[in-house]
Amino acid sequence: MPKTQLVRSYAKINIALNVLDKLDTGYHTLDMVMLPLEIHDSLYVQKLKNARDNYITVDDFSVGPVKYNLATFAIDALAAKYKFPDKFRIFVHKVIPMEAGLGGGSSNAAATLTGVNEYLKLGLNDNELIKIGAKLGSDIPFFIKGVPARVSGTGEKVEPITVKNDYYCILVKPPVGLSSKEVYDRCDLFALETCDIDAVIKALEEGDDELLASSINNSLQPVSIALCPEIQIIIDLLHEKGLKIVQLSGSGSCVFGLSTDKKLIKKVAKEIEDQYETVEVTKVRK
C-alpha cells in the first residue's frame, strides 16, 4: 500500500478588502488583510501506480468536480515545472462551505502544492510554491504562507502581520452561495468604498478592537448584498447580538463576527443555529 499523507487546508476571512484598479486582463488589483481560521478541509494525498491521470475526489456530493479544477491544475503545474512523472489521488473531506468567500477551493489548491511537495521531498520553499500558485488563483499565495497577512497586487504579494488578540469567530452563511466571478464582474458598476489598511493592521497589532471595528471594510459587500440581500440581515443580526466586528468575507456569501469573548461567540451561535444551516464557531490562527 502506498503511503497516505494528511494535509490540512484552512479557511480564511478578509478583515479588510479594498478593490483598486481594473487591469487589462480583467482582474482587479487588491489590498487586503486576510486571517486564516482553524476550520479546515482535510486532504489525503496518495501516489498512484501506473496511472495516467491525477484524481481529485470529494465527500460533499453537492459540489461538482469543477470546484476542484484548481487542485488538479496545481499538481499539473508542479509536475510541468519540476518534471516528475508521478500521478496522485487526492481525497478531500469538505468542511469549509463553498461559494462563501472563505477560500475553500484556493486553500485546497495550496494544500495540494504543499502536500505533493512534501510527499515527493522536492524541497521547495514557500516562495517557489507561491510563484506556481499565483498563476492559478489570487488567494493561493496567502494559503501557502498560512499566517495573518496583508495581501496585495493580484494576490501575489503576501506580507505577514502580527495579531495580538486571540479572536474567536462565528461564520454564518445564507442558503444562497455567490460566485466570485459574478461579484467581481459586477463590482465595476458600483462606487466602491475602501478603508485605511494601515489602521486595520495597527488595530490588530495593538489589540484595539474599537479601532478595528471602526476601520474594517469590504469593497465587495454592497455588490454581494445586491445579489443576496440576506447578507445584510445576517450582518444586522450579529450586531444586534452584541458583536462589533462583523463583515462579509471575500465575495461572500458568508458573514463573520469576531470577538475575544469565546462565551459570547458560542452564545450567539446557539441562539441562531436554528435560523441558518451553516453556523460555525472557529478561531483565528496566529
Image: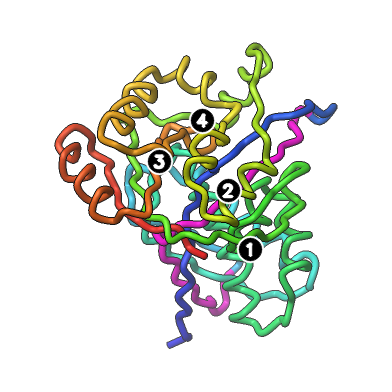
Q: Judge whether residue 170 is colored magenta.
A: no
SS assignment for the magenta stretch, majority: strand
Q: Residue at x 60, y 51 (%)?
A: 70
Mark 1 or 2, nearer chain start: 1
Between the residue at mark 3 and the residue at mark 1, the CA separation in whole angstroms equals 22 Å
Mark 3 or 1, nearer chain start: 1
Mark 2 Cα shell of 10 Å, populated few (<14), some (14-19), many (≥20): many
Q: Nearer the viewer, residue 259 or 276?
A: 259
Residue denoted by label 2: 203
Q: Please name the amino acid that badge 2 sits on.
A: Ala
Between the residue at mark 3 and the residue at mark 2, the CA separation in whole angstroms equals 18 Å
List x then y, in percent, for residue 189: 65, 11
Residue denoted by label 3: 256
Q: Nearer the viewer, mark 3 or mark 1?
A: 3
Q: Nearer the viewer, mark 4 or mark 1?
A: 1
Left or right of 26, for residue 242: left
Left or right of 90, for residue 28: right
Q: Nearer the viewer, mark 2 or mark 4?
A: 2
Q: Please name the amino acid that badge 3 sits on.
A: Phe
Q: Nearer the viewer, residue 178 or 63?
A: 178
Mark 3 or 4, nearer chain start: 4
List x then y, in percent, for residue 184: 62, 26
Between the residue at mark 2 and the residue at mark 4, the CA separation in whole angstroms equals 31 Å
Disc 1 secondary structure class: helix
Is the C-beta separation of discs 3 and 1 under 8 Å? no
Q: Please name the amino acid that badge 1 sits on.
A: Ile
Q: Please name the amino acid that badge 4 sits on.
A: Ser
Give the residues in magenta.
Answer: 26-51
Residue denoted by label 1: 144
Disc 2 secondary structure class: helix
